Amino acid sequence: MNCVTGKQMLRDTLAGRQAPLIPSAPLYMGLYCESLWRGKLVEVYREMAANRTRLTLSFDALTDAHLEAWDRTWALFHAPPDWMRTRWGINRSQAEGSTVALTRNACIWTSADGKTSVDYLAPYSATTSSSVDIWDRDVPLSTVTDVEALVPLQTWESWLEDRRATWIERSLGRWGDRHLIKTTTGAPFWGAYSILGFSGLMHAVKQQPAMLEKLLERLLHNRMEYIRAVAEVGVPCLFIEECFSSADIISEADFARLAWPMLRDMIAYAADLGLLTVFYYCGQIEGRVPYLAQSAANALAFEEEKKNIKIDLAEIRSVVGPAKTILGNLDVTALRDASREKVHALIAEQARAAGAPFVASVGSPVIVDTPPERVSWVTEAARNLSLSGSALNQSNS
């Protein structure tokens, strides 16, 4: 029986040393778990309230309730992933004295200043107006003053103010011995979308590249400050995502000038601080993999084949070489709909194609109506495989 923990296997694999068994690290588990977590949080609050209909929370009580709900959510997986996301918590000033109002059909948390309310029993949608109403936004980007106003510079210390790092610190203490704790951020080019909108970003690429480059430099500064804060609080792993710079959206020349230098420097900075980095690239990868192979990322991840996009893990391995870890990109519709045997076979096929070092994963966020039992199949499949060089064998463990 192999006594190596999933955390150890994943750390070793990301460091380029394939472990005795294949680790499991499905992407975007926070998105998948959010609605489940909200249900568990209601459960925790009802237990805290006993027969009362109203709670007044301290900062520590709120944080502990959130973590307990996450613990119960994670317990839904009989074979959980080997990594676990953590996040920055709510500010102490908003949590201390916040309230929870409980009825049969509602569980409404209200911040201490009364400006923010959340009903944790209301239907949850991951898509909000802030993320879907900016496709046609076209923000002026004419002068340096415009750039400076759009992206105020931040410091890493600001991330630690008002005890925002408490969730992270307690996550490390609570689960850090079993799971590789990671947090996430986006690459600068991807971050520019949320500021300029899709239309504005695409116009800037072609019409105002010099101003866009200055904006990206400021975004890079802020990303690096964020990464410094992550390292300061002891998070060992960073997940970085990039969207809208793929070959189906911008040219390789524009990628090489605007997206790649910021991404390269950002990943290098994280590596210099000792963080394990997993980089996820969304979209068509033609002309991109040679760049990504040069990055300091420990591992590369890609979405599944869809939208006529071809993602061949064997071809990627031939470009990136034997040292860099590749994450699998299992189609999440197969995870939701296919048989257990089929899911296991698909992950085995990906492991053969990618070779070592390899991590079982998915290509997109797990579809929210996928039962937790099926999510556990990713880890099950990984544990049934071992890699020796690039050859896949059934494990005897």
Image (cartoon, rainbow, N blue to C red):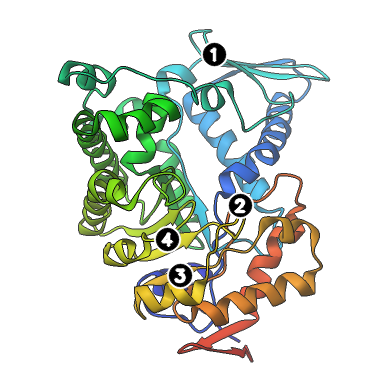
Q: Earlier in the sequence, mark 3 or mark 2?
A: 2
Residue depicted at x 79% and y 64%: 338
Discs 4/1, front? 4
What is the three-letter code of the residue carrying label 3? Ile
Write down the residue under mark 1: 116
Q: Position of residue 313 (x, y in %)?
A: 50, 72
Residue depicted at x 30% and y 57%: 275
- Local packing at callout 3 (Cα closer than 10 Å; few below 14, some 14-19, many 20+) is many
User: Distance of mark 4 from mark 1, alpha carbons?
Assistant: 44 Å
Residue depicted at x 42% and y 76%: 317
Residue 159 is marked as none
What is the three-letter code of the residue carrying label 1? Thr
Figure check: 396 above or below 17: below
In the picture, the quarter occupied by the N terminus is bottom right
Write down the residue under mark 3: 326
Please name whichever residue, 323 or 88, is drawn nearer the observer in this view of the structure.
323
User: Distance of mark 4 from mark 2, alpha carbons?
Assistant: 14 Å
- Local packing at callout 4 (Cα closer than 10 Å; few below 14, some 14-19, many 20+) is some
- Helix, strand or loop status at disc 3: strand
Write down the residue under mark 2: 307
- Local packing at callout 1 (Cα closer than 10 Å; few below 14, some 14-19, many 20+) is few
In the picture, the quarter occupied by the C terminus is bottom right
Figure check: 191 above or below 196: below
Q: Can you see residue 45? A: yes
Q: Position of residue 356 (x, y in %)?
A: 46, 81
